[in-house]
Image (cartoon, grey):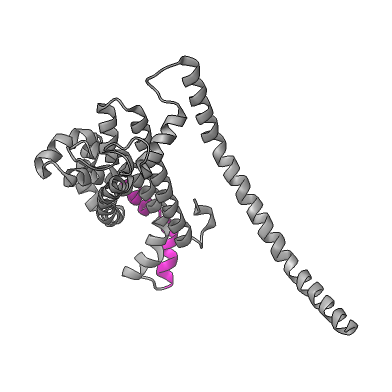
């Protein structure tokens, strides 16, 4: 029995010795991630503390304290507190807004990315379209609101159109910039290796322009969420933008802030997904990781 005990002890020691580096690496990774999380929440916690302090100090009734917003967020999500028209309605409003945001954003990406690649590659096409695009780009999206209601009527299609307009130009301009910034030496090297036509596009142009394309997608995605409030001013009854407008009309500031927080959180999580996709596609280029 003693021999068996010694053998088991040696085996456990060997296993423990082998797994120690792995455990150390895992512990280091957890500590680093915890540090990043703690650093990231410093500013939000400080802002919430400042918000609560200023509301208490001024005694204002126009801005609710954080505690009232927390109650509103709970009721908006689960109900059971105010039991009004907004109670437990978050899933409905969020789902509707998601459809409009990503309907407009994906439509903008599908059109802007190929068009940007062509504008970046073909000078004659850029000379033909760039003046028109430069003329339309400074026009505020809000200026399109009356026309969108005429073109598409009252409803979700107007909101999708406005989101599309807001996301289109950032994606387009960054794609054009990425394609135009491809080093000519890369084309020369590819030609020497016999790379031509569509293969040249797949092997040189697209990989080199991908970082700028993703920058445009992130900017366009941010504008899509910004403009959903404007898009849902077109008379739609549901959506996070509609909730914010209703809160303004009813002078329920806690409802307005709740809608803003939900948009911020969902936009943040969606942006993380774009970053994950960017880092995966650009794993060959760590300096372009977000």
Using the rendered image of the protein, determine whether residue 263 is visible from the camera's viewpoint.
Answer: no
Vertical arrangement, residue 8 with respect to residue 167, above or below:
below
Between 60 and 100, the one lying in front of the other is: 60
Residue at 38% from the left image edge and 61% from the top image edge: 206
Q: Position of residue 253 (x, y in %)?
A: 34, 27
Q: Magenta stretch: residue 189 in it?
A: yes
Count of numbered tags: 0
Q: Position of residue 122 (x, y in %)?
A: 27, 55
Tell whether 23 sits left or right of 259: right
Q: Position of residue 177 (x, y in %)?
A: 36, 48
Q: Please report the bounds of the magenta region as a residue range.
A: 173-193
Tell whether 268 sits left or right of 108: right
Q: Picture quarter containing residue 83?
A: top left
Predominant SS of the magenta segment: helix
Q: Position of residue 73 (x, y in %)?
A: 39, 38
Q: Magenta stretch: residue 238 in it?
A: no
């Amino acid at each position: 029995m003693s021999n068996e005990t010694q053998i088991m002890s040696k085996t456990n020691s060997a296993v423990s010795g082998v797994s120690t580096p792995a455990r150390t690496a895992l512990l280091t990774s957890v500590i680093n991630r915890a540090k990043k999380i703690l650093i990231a929440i410093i500013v939000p916690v400080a802002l919430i503390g400042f918000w609560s302090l200023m509301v208490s100090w001024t005694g204002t009734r126009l801005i609710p304290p954080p505690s009232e917003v927390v109650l509103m967020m709970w009721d908006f999500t689960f109900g059971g507190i105010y039991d009004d028209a907004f109670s437990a309605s978050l899933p409905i409003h969020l789902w509707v807004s998601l459809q409009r945001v990503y309907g407009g954003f994906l439509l903008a990406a599908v059109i802007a990315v190929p068009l940007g690649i062509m504008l970046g590659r073909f000078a004659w096409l850029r000379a033909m379209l760039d003046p028109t695009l430069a003329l339309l780009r400074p026009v505020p999206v809000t200026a399109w609101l009356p026309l969108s209601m005429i073109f598409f009527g009252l409803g979700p299609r107007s909101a999708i159109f406005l989101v599309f307009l807001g996301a289109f130009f950032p994606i387009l301009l960054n794609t054009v910039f990425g394609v135009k910034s491809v080093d000519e030496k890369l084309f020369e090297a590819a030609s020497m290796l016999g790379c031509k036509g569509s293969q040249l596009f797949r092997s040189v142009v697209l990989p080199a322009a991908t970082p700028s394309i993703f920058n445009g997608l992130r900017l366009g995605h941010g504008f899509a969420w910004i403009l959903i409030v404007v898009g849902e001013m077109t008379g739609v009854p549901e959506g996070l933008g509609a909730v914010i407008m209703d809160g303004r009309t009813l002078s329920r500031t806690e409802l307005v802030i709740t809608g803003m927080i939900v948009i911020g959180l969902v936009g943040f999580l969606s942006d993380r997904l774009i970053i994950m996709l960017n880092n995966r596609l650009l794993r060959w280029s760590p300096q372009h990781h977000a």
